[in-house]
Image (cartoon, rainbow, N blue to C red):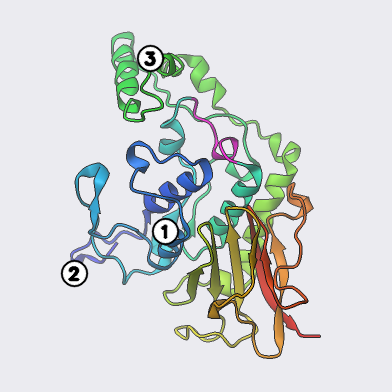
Amino acid sequence: MRPFNKGGYGLDSLWNDDFHHSAMVALTGRNEAYYCDYLGNPQEFLSAVKWGYLYQGQRYKWQKKRRGTPSLDLDPACFVNFIQNHDQLANSVRGLRVHQRSSPARYRAMTALLLLGPGTPMLFQGQEFAASSPFCYFADHKEELAKRVCKGRAKFLAQFPSIAPPQTQACLPDPADPRTFERCKLDLGQRERHAEAYRLHADLLKLRREEPVFRAQRRGAVDGAILSAQAFVLRYFGGEPGVSAPGGTEDRLLVANFGRDLPLDPAPEPLLAPLEGRLWEIQWSSEDCRYGGSGTPPVDTADDTWRIPGEAAVVLRPAPRP
């Protein structure tokens, strides 16, 4: 992603597989095969938000060598974050969409992190309306090559211990079977029938477009802190570009919790501190009933304690203190 005169290839951006792998572990609980170097914990998400790649030259167990090169100086826009793409969906037994392999609430929270993070978000076809169609590996080859492709595909997926057993291998769809391809076609009518999922994505993209702190893609504009084993906070700083300090009414918090309800009393984390004379109010929640959620209680409560809802992401904005 660096220019030619600095040893790069002049690319605009690259997929951030690290973000995807951490997200998949958090969403599904599985970290087998090439997911084994990821835990899906708050530290990984904070690091991915702030620095892009998680591996920038450290040892990578799965490849038995160091992986990556330093990229701490690159802007967040260079990193394309995603939780679905054609490769990763097809690298499974049935090509299931991610929302079909996770809890609905946790998936909504992860979608908020994806679409409000400072990286460049990417949505895979049909993701925005929770497409029920799978995305399997399919290929149209002549008979002899098709047999070898089918065999090679099964061998590749055997790196996953859960897919390696013969009874699971027998469930793999044949890439050359036309029915494998037909099952992957989108049903665009689901935009209306899956209105809650479609509305979730539309509202998050509107928030990203209209709020300057979410629209900004510059280094130092976001900081974060771990609140528990499964919860964390991101603070988006308003103000002038290059000034990464709280103090403006444009500041926003994104509180994400992939675990159970989390009471914080006390809450000794400076990034949670409200602006002087203000407190935090909910601006947006992944648990809004319009998205299929179950509602959201106050987070920065009237008795000055914090209660972070489980399996949820909440955007907070400054409000006048009564």
**Label 1, on which residue?**
44
Kind of residue at disc 1 = Glu
Mark in front: 3 vs 2:
3
Instruction: Examine the rendered structure and indicate whether residue 250 appears above or below residue 178.
Output: below
| Secondary structure beneath label 1 | helix
Residue at the outermost bottom position: 276
**Badge 2, how many Cα within 10 Å: few under 14, some, many 20+?**
few
What's drawn in magenta, residue-wise? 94-102
Closer to the camera, 99 or 180? 99
Residue 100 among those drawn in magenta:
yes
Looking at the image, can residue 305 be seen? yes
Kind of residue at disc 3 = Pro
Kind of residue at disc 2 = Asn
Which x, y percent locates residue 19?
Answer: 42, 53
Quote the CA–CA distance across marks 3 and 2: 52 Å
Please name the residue shown 50% across and 22% down the image.
181
Residue at the outermost top position: 143
Please report contact status of discs 2 and 1: CB closer than 8 Å, yes or no. Answer: no
Judged by its main secondary structure, the magenta piece is: loop
**Label 2, on which residue?**
5
Mark in front: 2 vs 1:
1
Please report contact status of discs 3 and 1: CB closer than 8 Å, yes or no. Answer: no
Of labels 2 and 1, earlier in sequence is 2
Instruction: Examine the rendered structure and indicate whether residue 18 appears above or below residue 270.
Output: above
**Label 3, on which residue?**
166
Which x, y percent locates residue 298?
Answer: 75, 67
Closer to the camera, 254 or 7? 254
Quote the CA–CA distance across marks 2 and 1: 32 Å
